[in-house]
Image (cartoon, helix red, strand yellow):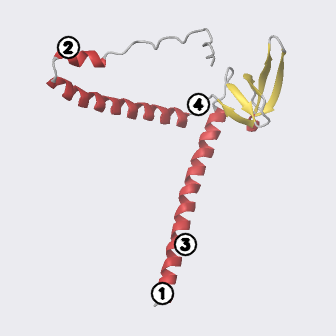
Amino acid sequence: MQSWLIWIFLGIIIVLFVVYFVFSGRKNKQRRQEYAEQIEAIKPGNKVKTTGGICGIVKEVCDDGTIVMETGSEQTGKSFVKIDKECIYQTDAKGPMQIAREEAEARRRAEKEAKKAAKSGEKTEEKPAEEAATPAEEPAEAPAAPEEAPEEKQD
């Protein structure tokens, strides 16, 4: 009887490993596809960082799979580097998948806020109008931080 329990336990573990690898492979495939779309979306003006750690701004995208990147500043002197697109590690360019995901997330947030406002609206209907309007009002901008450094306390 114990041998059957061992085989069942072993079978469950094997099934769990197979399910884990199937789902992790799907997630990795989605990440690779998103990365490829992001690299293809690079255009002049995008900021990029290479695998070697060089940061710069794209000045030209060539047809042969390379880009011309500007590094440096006016003070230190600008330089131009031509690198392969595959060497790009990070960029601010957005591919179609990333744009769609951000739009869906913004919609979800807006729906959540609408539900929250509807709930608070139901509660405020019970209160007088003056009390309901006061907590909902918020300042347009947060007060600016003082420019002076705070004084050190002396003991």
Q: Circle 3 is placed at which residue position?
A: 14
Residue drawn at point x = 52 percent, y = 11 percent: 144
Residue drawn at point x = 53 percent, y = 72 percent: 13
Residue 144 vs residue 12, the one in the foreground: 144
Rendered location of residue 121, percent (x, y): 22, 26
Measured in 3D between alpha carbons, the distance from the residue under mark 4 to the one under mark 3, in whole angstroms, is 39 Å
Indicate the quadrant containing the N terminus: top left, top right, bottom left or bottom right.
Answer: bottom left
- Whichever of callouts 4 and 1 sits on the residue coming sooner in the sequence is 1
Between circles 4 and 3, the one closer to the viewer is 3
Q: Are dots 3 and 2 in contact, CB under 8 Å?
A: no
Residue type (three-letter) at the residue carrying disc 1 = Trp
Q: Circle 2 is placed at which residue position?
A: 130
Q: Are dots 1 and 2 in contact, CB under 8 Å?
A: no
Measured in 3D between alpha carbons, the distance from the residue under mark 4 to the one under mark 1, in whole angstroms, is 54 Å
Q: Quadrant of residue 125?
A: top left
- Whichever of callouts 3 and 2 sits on the residue coming sooner in the sequence is 3
Measured in 3D between alpha carbons, the distance from the residue under mark 1 to the one under mark 3, in whole angstroms, is 15 Å
Measured in 3D between alpha carbons, the distance from the residue under mark 3 to the one under mark 2, in whole angstroms, is 64 Å
Rendered location of residue 67, percent (x, y): 76, 28
Classed neighbour count for the residue bearing mark 3: other residues with Cα under 10 Å, few (<14), some (14–19), many (≥20): few
- Whichever of callouts 2 and 4 sits on the residue coming sooner in the sequence is 4
Q: Circle 1 is placed at which residue position?
A: 4
Q: Are dots 4 and 3 in contact, CB under 8 Å?
A: no
In the rendered image of this protein, does residue 145 appear above or below residue 91? above
- Whichever of callouts 4 and 3 sits on the residue coming sooner in the sequence is 3
Q: Circle 4 is placed at which residue position?
A: 94
Q: Is residue 62 left or right of residue 29?
A: right
